Image (tube, coloured by chain):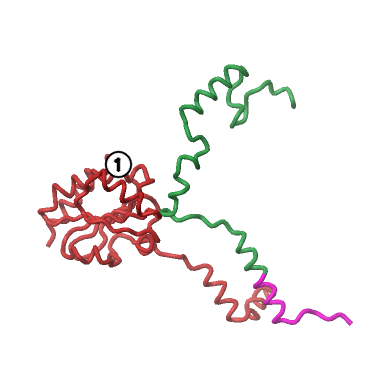
Chain colours: A green, B red
Amino acid sequence: MRQGIGGGMRWAMLLMCMTLLGGCSAMQPKAWQRGDLAQPEMAWDPDPVDAAIRQHTYESKEAASGSAAVGGGGCGCSN
Amino acid sequence: MNRASAAVRNTPPRLAALCLLGLLPAAQAVQPQQPAPAFDALAGHQGEVRLVDFWASWCGPCLQALPRYEALRQELHASGFEVIGVDVDQRPQDGAKLLQTLHLSYPQVVDPQGRLAELYGVNGMPASYLIDRKGQVRQVHVGFDKNDIEPLRKAVAQLVEEK
């Protein structure tokens, strides 16, 4: 004979699953909590001028542009 | 349809209440025409037109705004206008170091835990709240551009005329 899970136990499991899933939700910092994120070392490119010069050199040497971050560039011969 | 309504009927009330609790927003942002949430520095200037400015040392536009608010305060303080700065730096020494260089004459409140920011529902930096003599929020402004100062000056000049 098949025995099902009791109603109370089912709800407890559902609640536990919801709690566990809630733990995976993104915790967005509030506007006033972004101090650490605003530090220069947190920037993708800490020195934008240096990054632009490096990108320019890369494009000149590879004879291609935009290949580092956006679609396009290169010979397009792999398709 | 019937199955869904049966599921709702069978949901224990405590669980339903718990789910509804999750839908509630954490804090409501203060809107114009609402009374300004009270704090000591604000109450100390009751009856004046006040600009509560939430700023931080790491926020670029805030650094542009601070000296301009100081100039505005110098111009209109005699008419009954005061600026109250709220430094939300989580490391208050960062804000204090900046203040040493700016020499601002208006009162500053340190809010490293963000309690006041939470109370006002600040959703961007800098955020300023223009409060009239009766304690009503009349204008909420998020962000700062140098062109914002002239409309603000006009709004303050108009509010100080109100009795």
Query: Which quadrant of the view contains residue B45?
Result: bottom left
> Vertically, is B57 above or below A76?
below
Q: Helix, strand or loop at disc 1?
A: helix
> Dot 1 falls on which chain?
B
Give the residue at x 46% y 65%: B25
Q: Name the residue carrying label 1.
A: B64
Amino acid under disc 1: Gln
Residue at the extreme right:
A1
Which residue is drawn at the image coordinates 10% and 54% (left, top)?
B79
Instruction: Judge from the rendering whether residue B73 lies leftward or rightward of residue A33; answer left or right.
Output: left
- Main secondary structure of the magenta stretch: helix
Residue A2, horizontal then vertical, whole percent: 86, 80
Q: Residues within 10 Å of mark 1 (few under 14, many from 20)?
A: few
A29 sits to left or right of A78:
left
Is B65 placed left or right of A58 in the picture?
left
Residue at (57% x, 17% y) in the render: A60
Q: Quadrant of the C terminus of chain A?
A: top right
Q: Is residue A9 magenta?
A: yes
Residue, x 57% and y 56% (percent of image)?
Answer: A26
Picture quadrant where residue B132 is located: bottom left
The quadrant the N terminus of chain A occupies is bottom right
Residue sitting farthest toward the left: B78
Q: Is residue B161 left or right of residue B55?
A: left
Vertical relation: A79 (above or below) A15: above
Residue B140 placed where, x, y %?
Answer: 31, 55
Magenta range is A1-16
Residue B150: x %, y % from top left: 21, 43
Estimate the x, y position of residue A10 in percent, counting from the top left.
71, 77
- Residue B149 in the magenta stretch? The answer is no
